[in-house]
Amino acid sequence: MPNPRIPARTPAGFTLIEMMIVVVIVGILAAIALPSYSEYVTRSKIIDGTTKLGDFRAQMEKYFLDNRTYLNGSDCGVPDKPAGAGDAFGIACTGTATTYTITATGSAAKGMSGFSYTITQTGLKGSSGPSGDYSNSNCWSVRKDGSCQ
């Protein structure tokens, strides 16, 4: 017969099975969350690149208004902006006196290898990505399925 003066010991802590259940649940959540997070980071870098394209285009139009040409000698009136240490995209321009095409090319060092976004003086936008993802000839695609921004 148990002694009423000595309290019964209750087990403390977790069993190995309980710990393994928690590990499995965390693994499932990570398997769902990491691809979504990776896609989010890629889209944010794309938005940064397309924003730089828009800024460069505005500078080209300002240059044209001031000089009545898009060229400064044989180069575009606004100097190219290669990808710096913190940039996911480098910006380059090709053109003639009355036309230009600005291209944002993804930096491999920032995980954006294979990404390319363009815009012309008429506002025609295009995009392409690795393995055919993010590709659209009519807009800047920010999603794998090619849907427009």
Image: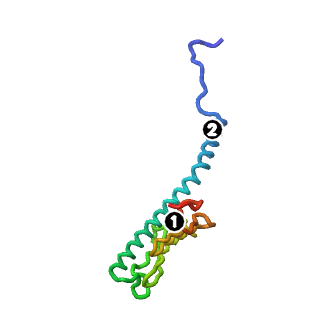
Name the disc covering residue 80, or none. none
Sort mark 1 into few (<14), some (14-19) or many (20+) by Cα contacts within 10 Å.
Answer: many
Q: Position of residue 127 (x, y in %)?
A: 54, 68
Q: Position of residue 83 (x, y in %)?
A: 47, 72
Task: Give me the C-alpha separation between circle 2 and circle 1.
Answer: 47 Å
Name the disc covering residue 19, or none. 2
Residue 66 is drawn in which quadrant?
bottom left
Q: Is residue 107 visible?
A: no
Residue 14 is drawn in which quadrant?
top right
Q: Look at label 2 and name its amino acid.
A: Met
To which residue does mark 1 refer? 140
Residue depicted at 61% across the width and 13% down the height: 3
Indicate whether 1 appears above or below 132: above
The quadrant of the image that shows the N terminus is top right
Counting every numbered tag in the picture gives 2
Cβ atoms at labels 2 and 1 below 8 Å apart? no
Residue depicted at 59% across the width and 29% down the height: 12
Indicate whether 96 appears above or below 107: below
Q: Look at label 1 and name its amino acid.
A: Trp
Q: Position of residue 86 (x, y in %)?
A: 45, 67
Of 146 and 45, nearer the camera is 146
Is 43 left or right of 16, judged from the image as shown?
left
Is 141 left or right of 56, judged from the image as shown?
right
Indicate whether 69 appears above or below 7: below
Residue depicted at 58% across the width and 62% down the height: 146
- Of callouts 2 and 1, the N-terminal one: 2
Mark 1 residue element: loop
Q: Position of residue 116 (x, y in %)?
A: 54, 70
